[in-house]
Image (cartoon, grey):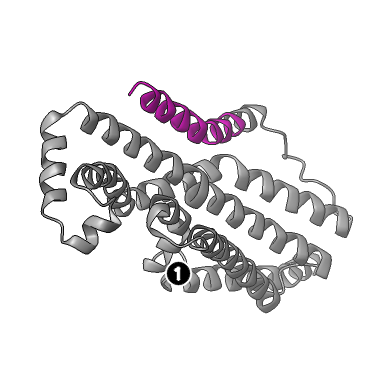
Amino acid sequence: PGSGGDKLAAQPLDEKEQCVMDEIAAEEAEVDIWRDTPVRYLGYANEVGEACRAFLPGWGVPASYALAISYVLADTADKAAKEWKISAKCETDPSTSVRAVRVAATATDALTWQLLASVFVPGSVIHLVVACTTRALDSIEPAKEAAAAVAGALPEPLLAAAGGSVDAAAVSVLAGIPTAIGLATIPFIVEPIDETIHKVCDASVRPTLTSGVDAFTRNDTGAPAPEDESFDAAAAAKGAMILGAALAFPPTLFTLGGIIEGGM
């Protein structure tokens, strides 16, 4: 009788776990509009705004940042709402406070991923591409001649907007090439950066958040910690180093780009 009672008591938990697995599978089968469609490019709006600053009205660049930030917050809210939905439907959490902590952890995960994948890393990569291209063009004499030829062929209204003279327009044309190349790299760097940041979070932020939620749940319910649970110092150190390297990567690229620009 005791064994049968234990099986009956464990059955609801099994059903809840199956419910969670089914819900996660259903979400993965859906297209994530925030990360798997062209909407993802809204996270790069500030990079585009900065690149086109010279051609935008005064409110253009701030608007590009507002658009990028709105995208980041919208994706964060979407991931938190999905976590809340799963928790509510499958009744996996013993209390509302545990559910709130779990949702907060999911939101933190999404926000961390977005800040790295949409703000910090892309800007530094594009800046380095622009700096290298500018340096290369500056050392190629035929590029300057080609820019002068393009400037000379501009219609009068465009020539006036570009400086009013062929020489001034040639400078604008030459300066616009690195910007155009920097923007053209965006479609090629989105997926590699996204996947890399996922791996960074898998090794650092996500295990920490999971451990925090588990600890809060035990504290909330009074449940003891598992006997076989132990702190993995090596994994924690590895995760910290990986996250540290990811955070150091953008400043390093910005510094390298500055050195390249300064050598011109």
Which percent across, then down, holds residue 101?
Answer: 76, 60
- As drawn, 238 above or below 74: above
For the N terminus, the quadrant is bottom right
One can see residue 95 in this view: no
Q: Is residue 106 magenta?
A: no
- Place of residue 94 in the rendered image (x, y in percent of width and height, measured from the top left): 80, 67
Q: Which residues are magenta?
A: 239-264
* SS assignment for the magenta stretch, majority: helix
Q: Quadrant of the C terminus?
A: top left
Number of marks in picture: 1
Task: In this rendered view, identify the residue nearer to me: 15 or 42.
Answer: 42
Q: Residue at x 66, y 32 (%)?
A: 232
Q: Is residue 251 magenta?
A: yes
Viewer-proximal residue among 213 and 133: 133
Q: Is residue 18 above or below residue 140?
A: below
Residue 252 in view of the camera: yes
Q: Residue 174 vs residue 118: left or right?
A: left
Report x, y in % for residue 262. 40, 24
- Residue lying farthest to the right in this orientation: 222
Q: Amino acid at mark 1?
A: Asp
Q: Read off the residue under disc 1.
A: 32
Q: Is residue 27 left or right of residue 219?
A: left
Q: Which of 172 and 93 lies nearest the eye of the viewer?
A: 172
Q: Residue 76 at what x, y percent from top left?
A: 60, 63
Q: Is residue 147 left or right of residue 102?
A: left
Image point 55% across, 40% down: which residue?
203
**Residue found 22% across the figure and 56% down from its top:** 159
What residue is rendered at 32% in x and 51% in y? 183
Instruction: Tell me the SS state at disc 1.
Output: loop
Q: Between 113 and 161, which is closer to the camera in this rendering?
A: 161
